[in-house]
Image: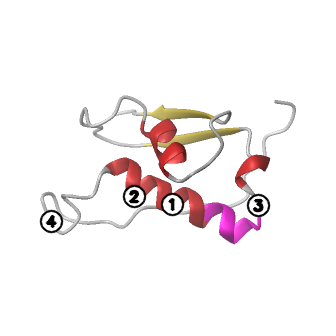
Amino acid sequence: MMEVVVVSAVRTPIGRYCGALRDVPVYRLAGLVLNETIKRANVKPGQVDEVIMGQSYQNGECANGARMALLDAGWPVEIAGITIDRR
């Protein structure tokens, strides 16, 4: 990767612990965020080289939320996904 470009930023909704979003998998929420991000930036998924997402207090639902999110969103399998969990 020669040049890093941030084209847009979107976040998931904020909810209460065990609230209305408790049954929605984290990767499903993140997939919605990914698709909205490229929509706002007028970019196609195939133009993305890598996805780096942050998540706090990751639970064990999936080992790599960014990878699961981009696959759930229907993005090409060739795109790398990395999750940062810093507490």
Local crowd at mark 2 within 10 Å, few (<14), some, or many (≥20)? some
Q: State yes or no: residue 5 in magenta.
A: no
Determine the CA span between mark 2 and mark 3: 20 Å
- Quarter of the image for residue 23 reads bottom left
Residue at which label 2 appears: 29
Local crowd at mark 4 within 10 Å, few (<14), some, or many (≥20)? few
Q: Which of marks 4 and 2 is nearer the N terminus?
A: 4
Residue at which label 4 appears: 19
Residue at which label 3 appears: 43
Determine the CA span between mark 1 and mark 2: 6 Å
Residue at which label 1 appears: 33
Q: Who's the residue at 51% across and 60% down the image?
A: 33
Determine the CA span between mark 4 and mark 1: 19 Å
Against 23, residue 58 (above or below) is: above
- Quarter of the image for residue 78 reads top right
Give 41 or 24, whichever is nearer the viewer. Answer: 24
Q: Are marks 1 and 2 in contact (CB under 8 Å)?
A: yes
Q: Earlier in the sequence, mark 4 or mark 1?
A: 4
Question: What's the magenta region?
Answer: 37-42
Q: What residue type is labelled 3?
A: Val
Residue 69 horizontal/vertical position (percent) = 47, 46
Frontmost of labels 4 and 2 is 2
Determine the CA span between mark 3 and mark 4: 33 Å
Q: Do the residues labelled 1 and 3 touch (CB within 8 Å)?
A: no
Residue 31 horizontal/vertical position (percent) = 48, 55
Q: Which colour scheme is used?
A: secondary structure
Residue 84 horizontal/vertical position (percent) = 46, 33
Q: State yes or no: residue 39 in magenta.
A: yes
